[in-house]
Image (spheres, grey):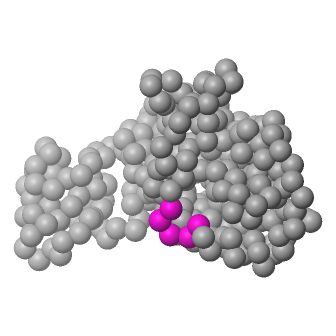
Amino acid sequence: MPNGILIIDKPQNWTSMDVCAKIRGILHEKRVGHGGTLDPMATGVLPVFVGQATRAVEFAENSRKEYVAGLRLGQVTDTQDVTGETLETRPVTASRRDVEAALGCFRGDIQQIPPMYSAIKIGGQKLYDLARRGKEVERRPRPVTIYELELLEQAGETDYLFRCVCSKGTYIRTLCHDIGQTLGCGGTLYSLRRTMAAGYTTAQAHTLEEVQEHGESLLQPVDTLFAQYPAYTVPSAGKENRVRNGGAITDASLPDGTYRVYGKNGDFLCLSRAEHGTLTSIKNFFGA
């Protein structure tokens, strides 16, 4: 059965779940999940986990992401992007220098109020379901982190492209809305491409047509998700059996930290944490 990670270049106007459904059909595998939702209007990197690799989805969802986004000043919409209904248009007097200065207000740890058109649940109901019924409810600000925010170019009289590296839970359309509010003219998102997620980039991404043609040969091993951590090979068959049975092992020479743990034959066994010479599994991936 296929097991591994497909790095998909999500096409526009597809939901992330649409992509998963397509992969299920191509690979004939029911266990398929994605590592971080992309809105239908967005394109770019969508890691899709297949088979036993779905056990790693949580690690992809929690990783930082990189986007190239289009900000349109002078327009405010109900969805905070151009797919929504325009609520307001305002004249734009902000210069490129003004936009660059405004970006500085959003670097680092910030608070975002989630948009009404989002899948967050309040009182057991998804916000976008309430929004579609014309209702708006109070949303609490949520902490997110903007690690990098760089103006790339002015793409038109009121249009700007910027690059953003951010934490899980960041809404780029809300970022555009808030930048517009800071500049006093309003703003909305007109384009969005994710260029990195879970450490994978557009250079590694494949179209659905390529997956249709090449199938599971495009699957990446699940341990590539953890490439930032050093590898550790279990030194004996006895200790490997202990790891495979979910037990901790000891190695006094091992510095504290997170490790990719492998068996003697090269099998990826688990992601583990070493503390004071004891190596304990965080998540097992036997056979993934």
From this view, report whether residue 257 is shown above or below residue 192.
Answer: below
Which quadrant is the C terminus positioned in?
top left
Main secondary structure of the magenta stretch: strand
Classify residue 211 as left or right of residue 269. right
Q: Is residue 236 above or below residue 107?
A: above
Q: Is residue 83 left or right of residue 197?
A: right
**How many marks are shown on the rendered structure?**
0
Q: Is residue 247 left or right of residue 70?
A: left
**Span of residues in magenta:** 106-110
Give percent across and percent down for residue 52.
38, 38
Q: Identify the residue at image location x=30%, y=62%.
A: 260
Percent coordinates x, y for residue 184 in the rendering: 76, 61
For the residue pair 48 and 142, the one nearer the viewer reads as 142
Any part of residue 92 in sight: yes
Q: Residue at x 43, y 36 (%)?
A: 51
* 246 inside magenta stretch: no
The quarter holding residue 265 reads: bottom left
- Please name the residue shown 15% across and 74% down the image: 254
Work out whether residue 121 or residue 33 is closer to the camera in this orientation and state it: 121
Which residue is at a point 62% across and 74% down the rendered structure image? 104
Residue 84 position within the rendered picture, expressed as x and y whole percent measured from the top left: 78, 37
- Asked if residue 121 lies left or right of residue 14, the reply is left
**From the image, which quarter does the N terminus lie in?**
top left
Asked if residue 264 can be seen in this view, the reply is: no
The quarter holding residue 276 reads bottom left
Residue with the most extreme right position? 157
Q: Position of residue 203 (x, y in %)?
A: 65, 63
